[in-house]
Image (spheres, rainbow, N blue to C red):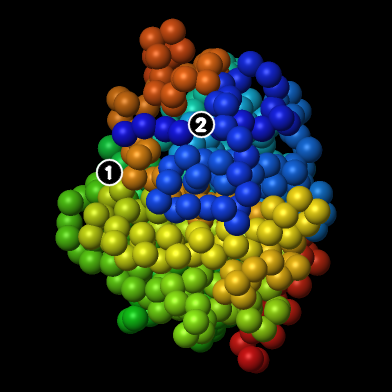
Amino acid sequence: MKFYKSSHPAVAAGAGAAIIAAGLPKDLNIASPSSIQSVAKTLAMGTMSYYSGTPTAFVDLPKPYYWWECGAMVGSMLDYSHYTGDHSYDPTLATALLAQVGPNFDYMLPAHYGDEGNDDQAFWGFAVLAAAERNFPQPNASIPDYLTLGENLWNSMAGRWNTSACGGGLLWQIFASNPNGLDYKNSVSNGGLFQLSARLARATGNQTYLDWAAKVWDWTTGVGMIDSDYVVLDGASAHDNCSAMNQVSFSYSTGIYLYGAAVMANVTSDPVWADRTEKLLDAAKSSFFGPFDNATDIMYEHACEQAGTCNNDMKSFKGYLSRFMYAATLYVPSIQATVNTLLGTSAQAAANACTGGADGTTCGQKWYVGGFDGSVGLGQEMCALETVQGLLVGQSTPPYKGDQIKVVREFAQTATSTAQPTATATAQPTKRSNSAASLGNNAAGMMGWLVVLASLLAL
């Protein structure tokens, strides 16, 4: 297994950067690794055009993008580095990851107490665990290694498991300053805890994480948040003990649970988890692909895309489904053919939608229209990026675990370097210790979310 490489001018010179020309998305050949690399490079440039941080300074995304989406963007770009082998962004990504750890090294950042919820923290958790699982460089010895940061984040989330209603589960929000989500238990927050638990179980071998993953899954299915058809529903109110499930379903929640189930299949070797992964994929195929007969196997956000009611957050959701579908194939081979068909078709459609703007590479939202639809934004760029670059997953190194996970202090220096740590670039694994957590989304933003959800239910 190997990596592919490319580059971007926004990153400091000296980080490994392959000599690959950026390619026009409309020219994508999904059967050609070099074509995938060159188009992914262009889409990565489009994604990073929304981020003004540097290798030495973190900067929040501009409005209207919330803090969680910055964590999601870092995760997308970590995938880019991993799948293509282009390490030119690595210093900027490391700076972003380490700048947001907070005083307790758990991604509870006082500056974002006004807009951090359990789901927001989870997306930073996905990113930091991806860094740990890939031995991504962590150059700052005064900050714990990525795996320890992930464990600290998990302790923070698990400590908020709420048994006052619904028999358990995480609430959407954390702080009373965000009251709109303090009575709502949702699938993305609980799915985040489920997936992080599964990944930490694999990375560390700690039975506690394995037990928690099973616990969160059992709770989710027990309250009907994953229904009998394996459709992942949005959530329910704690006021009525989660008895009336919100029937809206989003692609990212399905992807989060799907990948968590695939990791559990790998960790436990229990066929029940492979079966659950397959059924979640079947539900995803039925829900999020092929809105029309002439758009078979093309991904769309069924809750809002056709109606034109997706908010900025929702316009990024398809990318996370792509991310986690691709990743799941490494653990459950039985889904590879279906994933290859769905995401190969969707990648081609996404590339065809990235033909806007003066340079002909700006991405639109609706891939099934056969071209650029005029809807632009960070989410649209990330969705296309994840769906295209993931085509390289079969030639990538699977996530490390146990003693394979090392602390790497140095960034790749040459275009021929790989993400595999060398003897000169690898430190011995540090002793990890968990720190206690200091326990939101912006209140106006949350009200907007609730208005959108209400409108979707009324459709």
Mark 2 residue element:
loop
Taking the spot 17% from the left edge, 60% from the top edge, the residue there is 271
Q: Is 339 rendered above or below residue 142?
A: below
Q: Residue furthest front?
A: 27
Q: Is residue 94 left or right of residue 130?
A: right
Mark 1 residue element:
helix
In the image, which disc is placed on residue 207?
1
Viewer-nearest of discs 1 and 2: 2
Residue 424, x across and y down, in percent? 44, 8
In the image, which disc is placed on residue 5?
2
Which class describes the residues within 10 Å of circle 1: few (<14), some (14-19), or many (20+)? few
Residue 122, x across and y down, in percent? 54, 51
Q: Residue furthest top?
A: 424
Q: Residue furthest bottom?
A: 458
Amino acid at pointer 1: Gln
Which class describes the residues within 10 Å of circle 2: few (<14), some (14-19), or many (20+)? many
Q: Is 373 rendered above or below residue 227?
A: above
Q: Is 2 rendered above or below residue 293?
A: above
Residue in the foreground of this view, choosing between 180 and 91: 91
